[in-house]
Amino acid sequence: MAEYYDPKDEKFGLISSYLYRYFAEPFLYRYHKLIVSEILNYNPSKILDIGSGTGLLIKELSSKTEAEIYAVEPSKFMIDIAKRRLKKEISSGRVKIYQGSSRNIPIKGKFDLIITTFSFHHWSNKFDSIPYIMNFVANGGLFLIFDYDNDYGKFKNSHGLSSKEFPETIIKGYEVNFKHLPRSILEIILKNPEL
């Protein structure tokens, strides 16, 4: 079996996946409503969610859009929870879940919107992953990173991001915008330059 985690990544095993579901999800639900609203502003038709976790955001998103939704998650335990939660959406063919990571996306094709929500801060090689991920962005498409806002948030911590963290060498080849959303959420918008 392939190893989808980098040795330095924060890993979610059986116990941590269920703890996440029962303790973090109630807290995240209110953030997800805001993020889904933001995603729908882009009117996507084909979405890839990297680090999709237990499928909570996908459940909300799939109820608001007819877009095809693909999910990539390194934890088989998180995938098990997501598959139970999204049983109806998966059986209809609108949602597809794969084991993979920000460095190993096992899907062919391009997406008009790639998202990662409250996951980017867990990646030990987050900036090295960006060029690889951008290969999956369709012409005119976007890669959106949603995480806790360490620029304006009340609490600055390792489970958040600051716009100042993005090295100039990584973002140099892309159009990048930083958007500070309500509830201390930072949205980072990356776009390939027009060809």
Image: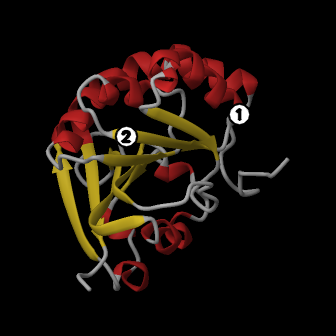
Q: State the residue at coordinates (36%, 78%).
A: 171
Q: Residue furthest front?
A: 92
Taking the spot 27% from the left edge, 43% from the top edge, the residue there is 185
Q: Amino acid at mark 1?
A: Lys
Name the foreground residue: 124 vs 53: 53
Identify the residue at the far right of this view. 1
Q: Is residue 139 left or right of residue 70?
A: left
- Name the side, left or right, on which 141 lies relative to 19: left
Tell which tag, 2 or 1, sits nearer the viewer. 2
Q: How is the image coloured?
A: secondary structure
Residue 16 in the image, given as x and y percentages of width and height: 67, 26
- Left or right: 89 in relation to 177: right
Q: Which residue is mark 1?
A: 76
Where is mark 2, residue-wise?
Answer: 68
Instruction: Using the image, determine if residue 71 lies above or below residue 2.
Output: above
Q: Name the residue at 23% across, 27% down.
A: 64
Q: Where residue 191 sits in the image (x, y, percent)?
A: 28, 70
In the rendered image, which quarter is residue 125 located in?
bottom right
Q: Secondary structure at mark 2?
A: strand
| Disc 2 residue crowd, few under 14, some 14–19, many 20+, Cα 10 Å | some
Residue name at image x 65 percent, y 45 percent = 10
Quadrant occupied by the C terminus: bottom left
Could you tell me residue 133's position as x and y percent? 48, 65
Mark before the other along the chain sequence, 2 or 1: 2
Disc 2 to disc 1, C-alpha distance: 22 Å
Q: Is residue 156 above or below residue 91?
A: below
Q: How many marks?
A: 2
Would you call the spot at circle 1 few (<14 residues within 10 Å), some (14-19), or many (20 or more)? some
Q: Secondary structure at mark 1?
A: helix
Residue 115 horizontal/vertical position (percent): 38, 50
**Type of residue at label 2?**
Glu
